[in-house]
Image (spheres, helix red, strand yellow):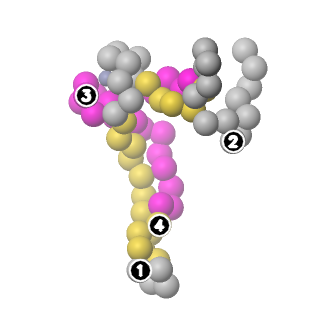
Amino acid sequence: MPALEPDQPVTIHCPHCGGENFLSDACARWNVETQEWELSNVFDDKTCDDCGIEVSAVERPVQEGA
Ligand SMILES: [Zn+2]
């Protein structure tokens, strides 16, 4: 199984329902200069919005099967 390129676009799928509606726990930091919340860190915990449970996301290359 070849390693994915760092810039390889992927889609993530729920192993239970196959959906792509994922929520990820993350940490945002307020930037005074831009007056916007900047993503500081994204944690590994993913939740499928459809199943409502924490799952291990399955990553697939976007161009798979194209
Ligand atoms: Zn799901």
Asked whether, in this view, residue 40 is left or right of residue 26, the answer is right
Mark 3 residue type: Asp
Q: Which residues are magenta?
A: 39-60
Q: Inspect the magenta stretch and tell me whether residue 42 lies in it.
A: yes
Residue at 69%, 41% (x, y): give it: 7
Q: Which residue is mark 2?
A: 7
Q: Main secondary structure of the magenta part?
A: strand
Of labels 2 and 3, earlier in sequence is: 2
**Residues packed near mark 4 inside 10 Å, few (<14), some (14 to 19) or many (20 plus):** few
Q: Secondary structure at mark 2?
A: loop
Decide if ligand 1 comes within 8 Å of the CB at mark 2.
no
State yes or no: discs 1 and 3 in contact (Cβ < 8 Å): no
Q: Secondary structure at mark 1?
A: loop
Q: Which residue is mark 1?
A: 35
Q: Which residue is mark 4?
A: 38
**Residues packed near mark 2 inside 10 Å, few (<14), some (14 to 19) or many (20 plus):** few
Mark 1 residue type: Gln
Of labels 1 and 3, earlier in sequence is: 1
Residue 31 spot, x, y in % from top left? 46, 77
Q: Which residue is mark 3?
A: 50
Mark 4 residue type: Glu
Decide if ligand 1 comes within 8 Å of the CB at mark 3.
yes
Q: CA distance from mark 2 to mark 3?
A: 27 Å
The image quadrant of residue 24 is: top left
**Residues packed near mark 1 inside 10 Å, few (<14), some (14 to 19) or many (20 plus):** few
Residue 60 spot, x, y in % from top left? 56, 24
